[in-house]
Amino acid sequence: MTTKVIVLGALSAVAEQTARLYAAEGAALMLVGRDRERLEAVAADLTVRGAARAEVAALDLAAEAGEARFQSLVEALGGVDHVILAYGALGGPEVETDLDAARALLEVDFTSAAIWALAAANRLERQRGGALVAIGSVAGDRGRASNYVYGAAKAGLAVLIQGLAHRLSRVGARAVVVKPGFIDTPMTAHIAKSGPLWAQPEAIARIVRRAADKGGPVVYAPGFWRLILLIIRALPSPVMHKTRL
């Protein structure tokens, strides 16, 4: 049976690598993003890699989230088994003081992502099966001076996905939030990279793909981040405030 997969934010590095894993399995994919030309190039590559089909939909995901729009993607693909929610923005220091920038980041990383997740959950609940996997972040586990607006959005999304996991468990469907740490992608190109905490998109994609089939509602990527964040969450505030995390 061909697995039907909708990838929201298909041009992110992790999403593209995840789509390649599905393509190798012969899945049918709906790639959603803003740049049609790039989407079509990725679709052609996935077809060569074994995808049964690779459709594209050029949408501004932050502006067009909604039940009807999601249903149109499902109909174009001929059904859906897995939904990968992989888009977002990191933002910069300006979001701490520029309220318009903060609002824009929150609308991308939480508000619109939440609406897409709810639309996907409604569909999975009706069909009594399937999986929703959303890319969150370890930044949502504790507020830190370096990226607390981004972290707040990812924290909200994680709680939403956990709630959906509880709701969907009653009908045999699944929802999972994957929380990566540092990933070497174009979104982090401005950050100096060194040390063992940095992961490649291919490694995170393998975790995302597994999460669609099994595991709990929260998956750290890689798994060692669970221990790191356990320690960070346990730090007393006077200690935390002396750090540069």
Image (cartoon, rainbow, N blue to C red):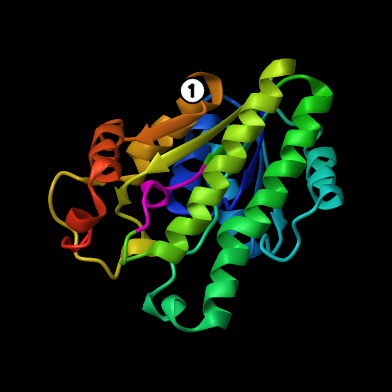
Residue identifier under label 1: 216
Part of the protein shown in magenta = 135-143
Give left or right: position of 242 versus 160.
Answer: left
Asked if residue 69 lies left or right of residue 183, the reply is right
- Residue 187 placement: quadrant: bottom left
The correct choice, above or below, for 119 with respect to 184 in the image is above
**Which one is nearer the viewer's eye here, 137 or 20?**
137
Percent position (x, y) of residue 17? Answer: 44, 42
Q: In the image shown, does 80 or 2 lie closer to the viewer?
A: 80
| Residue 22 visible in the picture | yes
* Quadrant where the image shows the C terminus: bottom left
Residue 171 percent across, percent down from the top left: 74, 17
Percent of width and height locating residue 188: 33, 62
- Residue 146 forms part of the magenta stretch: no
Q: For the point 64% across and 25% down, which residue is it?
A: 166
Q: Please state, as top left, top right, bottom left or bottom right, where the N terminus lies in the image.
A: top right
Question: For the residue marked with disc 1, what is the amino acid?
Answer: Gly
Q: Is residue 47 visible?
A: no
